[in-house]
């Protein structure tokens, strides 16, 4: 493993007003509509910021500058013609497991270092059709599981709030790039928490949608029975704008389902008064005890939700460890099955972190895997039963703020239970928003889980919560 | 349903570990083996939390669920639909319009059926729409096509596949099927 040599930044913050260079997607759309900014200007600002700050953050694996400029010019023409939608001219970047036609897609691995797909993933195709501008491809953990790793051709992404710290993963580049204002939004993938962990550690918003709502066609899989693709952005409103475009039935994804036909961006405006919010206190007080600062943040969040008119009560689910055991056995089994042929011929080319996390799948038996799937049905039923009483369940995605990169262990996913895996195993949507910050300025995430197809409710609650807390004004100082 | 986890399984011995790795077809160096041993110990702990003592007639998590007959996947309704007005972005709206384009095809066949009625010809055979009669079935019924199919079978492909299904009603009217 190579040494950490990048410059160290102290956790600090600068008001967003310092530079209108980093508006949210919603703000950028409004600026375009008023003629205060153009897609070409915004794209140039983003490219300049990437050139200046990404060498410290390693969020980008590939910057497609010329392609982005051409797309921005097209978007500008579309807007001048009075056409286009909320994402026309919006600069986005994608986790490097999303296939992009003619643009290298590596999954942050030597194995796919030369992989240039012929067509776009379905979600990328939809965003391109909506006029979004692709700035480039973002760092991930190798094949969305093996990381952070220092024995790969590209270094791991670093947290913009403190570059000594971990971004969370596996959508690590997405979390870092959005927080640092190097792009306005991204697509991540979530099998055990890969959208929500970087959202929590980097202080951005990330949605793991209901399984089947967003097509995974063209997204390099990790564990197909748990994989979901979803949006990441600075605010819940931005995630809703992205979801409006990427959600929808796709015959090429066998798990795709025709979800609710609604506008998520419009739905966020409805009031949240009367929503029944269950607090999964046992999760973060007993099963995976949270830090005192995280617990204080939860208390403040509950108070804010009460002020918004939500009805708060404690809720219970089976222990986090039960969800984690099922999730880990399924992920290891399915990931090994996907990689078996390559592992047997090119094992040394994978990172050590990948080998530690995936090789146990070679030793798991069919009976183990099926036992895990059967237990999953119990856990899905138990969760669905709890949602008879609640509209939303509140929990934490992590036990505290971002840890140091140097403290990361390769067997972390096995040794410590991940609070986020609950939503993957239970097949429900979950949203992570920034709930507050520690005394040293690091972001602390808060998680809302909803029943299947409750994505709109989560985004609505997240939007109102972000406005009530008012922490979207602060960006990391780079 | 309360399902208690089984007791923790015993730790795997080095010999057992080597046997398992060999059985999996893996060749590992000492460092890779050491990493796997550490990770496997964690996985064994996780396996201990997953219950095995279930009833035989318990649900089958790995069973497939198909859509009901005649129901297109796009028509399936989700469990919960939020009561918000629909306003789709331009791309989605365009995509949603696509299936409507299929309607003229249905109309075309209806017009043909009407023309047949006017001409006083009765439709041949069962009331099966032209779409449902596969090219393969028709090829099997036609003597010339049978020969072609046999030749193609030798070559490993079916020429019947190339026949457009839309032309079927026209051939029926010539009575060649009899």
Image: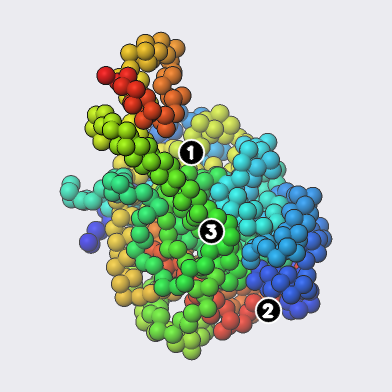
Query: What chain is tagged by disc 2?
Result: A
Q: Which residue is mark 3?
A: B93
- Which residue is located at x 53 percent, y 73 percent? A266
Query: What chain is tagged by disc 1?
Result: A
Residue neighbourhood size for the residue with mark 2, other residues' Cα within 10 Å, grouped as few (<14), some (14–19), many (≥20): few
Locate the C terminus of chain A by quadrant.
bottom right
Q: Secondary structure at mark 1?
A: helix
Residue neighbourhood size for the residue with mark 3, other residues' Cα within 10 Å, grouped as few (<14), some (14–19), many (≥20): few
What is the quadrant of residue A383 in the picture? Answer: bottom left
Q: Nearer the viewer, mark 3 or mark 1?
A: 3
Q: Nearer the viewer, mark 1 or mark 2?
A: 2
Q: Camera-side residue: A401 or B10?
A: A401
Residue neighbourhood size for the residue with mark 1, other residues' Cα within 10 Å, grouped as few (<14), some (14–19), many (≥20): some
Where does residue A119 sit, x and y in percent of width and height?
61, 41
Where does residue A78 sit, x and y in percent of width and height?
72, 60
- Which residue is located at x 35 percent, y 44 percent? A369
What is the quadrant of residue B110 in the picture? Answer: top left
Q: Nearer the viewer, mark 3 or mark 2?
A: 3
Visible residue check, residue A245: yes
Q: Secondary structure at mark 2?
A: loop
- Which residue is located at x 48 percent, y 68 percent? B86
Q: Which mark is residue A62?
A: none
Q: Secondary structure at mark 3?
A: helix
Query: What chain is tagged by disc 3?
Result: B
Q: Camera-side residue: A60 or A367?
A: A60
Q: Which residue is mark 1?
A: A338
Whole-angstrom CA distance, mark 3 to mark 1, is 36 Å
Whole-angstrom CA distance, mark 1 to mark 2, is 43 Å
Q: Which residue is mark 2?
A: A473
Q: Is residue A132 left or right of residue B156?
A: right
């Amino acid at each position: 493993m190579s040494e950490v040599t990048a410059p160290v930044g102290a956790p600090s913050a600068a008001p967003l007003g310092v530079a209108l260079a980093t508006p949210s997607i919603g703000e950028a759309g409004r600026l375009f509509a008023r003629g205060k900014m153009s897609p070409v200007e915004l794209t140039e600002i983003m490219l300049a910021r990437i050139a200046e700050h990404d060498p410290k953050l390693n969020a980008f694996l590939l910057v497609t500058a010329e392609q982005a400029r051409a797309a921005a010019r097209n978007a500008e023409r579309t807007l001048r013609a009075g056409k286009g939608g909320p994402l026309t001219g919006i600069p986005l970047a994608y986790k490097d497991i999303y296939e992009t036609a003619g643009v290298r897609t590596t999954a942050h691995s030597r194995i796919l270092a030369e992989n240039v797909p012929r067509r776009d993933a379905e979600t990328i195709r939809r965003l391109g059709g909506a006029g979004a501008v692709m700035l480039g491809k973002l760092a991930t953990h190798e094949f969305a599981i093996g990381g952070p790793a220092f024995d790969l051709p590209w270094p791991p992404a670093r947290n913009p709030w403190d570059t000594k710290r971990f971004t969370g993963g596996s959508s690590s580049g997405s979390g870092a790039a959005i927080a640092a204002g190097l792009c306005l939004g991204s697509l991540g993938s979530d099998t055990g928490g890969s959208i929500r962990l970087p959202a929590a550690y980097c202080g951005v918003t990330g949605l793991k949608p209901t399984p089947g709502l967003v097509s995974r066609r063209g997204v390099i899989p990790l564990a197909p029975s748990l994989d979901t693709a979803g949006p990441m952005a600075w605010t819940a409103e931005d995630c809703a704008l992205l979801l409006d475009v990427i959600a929808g039935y796709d015959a090429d994804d066998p798990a795709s389902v025709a979800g609710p036909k609604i506008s998520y961006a419009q739905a966020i405006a409805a009031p949240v008064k009367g929503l029944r919010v269950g607090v999964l206190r046992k999760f973060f007080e007993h099963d995976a005890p949270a830090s005192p600062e995280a617990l204080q943040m939860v208390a403040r969040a509950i108070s804010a939700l009460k002020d918004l008119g939500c009805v708060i009560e404690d809720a219970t689910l089976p222990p986090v460890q039960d969800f984690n055991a099922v999730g880990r056995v399924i992920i290891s089994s399915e990931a090994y099955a996907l990689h078996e042929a390559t592992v047997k011929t090119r094992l040394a080319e994978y990172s050590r972190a990948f080998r530690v996390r995936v090789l146990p799948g070679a030793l798991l038996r069919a009976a183990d895997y099926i036992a895990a799937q059967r237990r999953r049905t119990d856990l899905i039923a138990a969760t669905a039963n709890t949602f008879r009483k609640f509209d939303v369940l509140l929990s934490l995605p992590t036990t505290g703020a971002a840890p140091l990169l140097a403290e990361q262990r390769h067997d972390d996913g096995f040794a410590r239970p991940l609070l986020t895996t609950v939503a993957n195993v239970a097949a429900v949507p979950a949203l992570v928003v920034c709930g507050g910050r520690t005394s040293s300025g690091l972001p602390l995430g808060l998680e809302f889980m909803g029943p299947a197809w409750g994505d709109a409710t989560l985004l609505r609650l997240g939007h109102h919560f972000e406005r009530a807390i008012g922490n979207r004004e602060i960006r990391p100082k780079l | 349903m309360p399902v208690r986890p089984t007791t923790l399984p015993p730790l795997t011995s080095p010999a057992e570990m080597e046997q398992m790795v060999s059985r999996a077809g893996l060749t590992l160096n000492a460092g890779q083996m050491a990493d796997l041993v550490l990770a496997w110990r964690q996985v064994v702990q996780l396996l201990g939390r997953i219950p095995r003592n279930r009833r035989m007639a318990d649900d089958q998590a790995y069973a497939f669920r198909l859509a009901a007959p005649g129901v297109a996947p796009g028509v399936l309704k989700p469990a919960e639909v939020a009561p918000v007005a629909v306003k789709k972005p331009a791309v989605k709206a365009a995509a949603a319009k696509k299936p409507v384009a299929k309607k003229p095809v249905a109309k075309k066949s209806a017009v043909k059926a009407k023309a047949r009625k006017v001409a006083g010809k009765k439709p041949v055979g069962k009331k099966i729409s032209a779409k449902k009669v596969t090219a393969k079935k028709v090829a099997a019924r036609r003597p010339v096509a049978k020969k072609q199919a046999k030749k193609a079978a030798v070559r490993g492909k079916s020429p019947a596949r190339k026949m457009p299904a839309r032309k079927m009603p026209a051939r029926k009217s010539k009575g060649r099927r009899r």
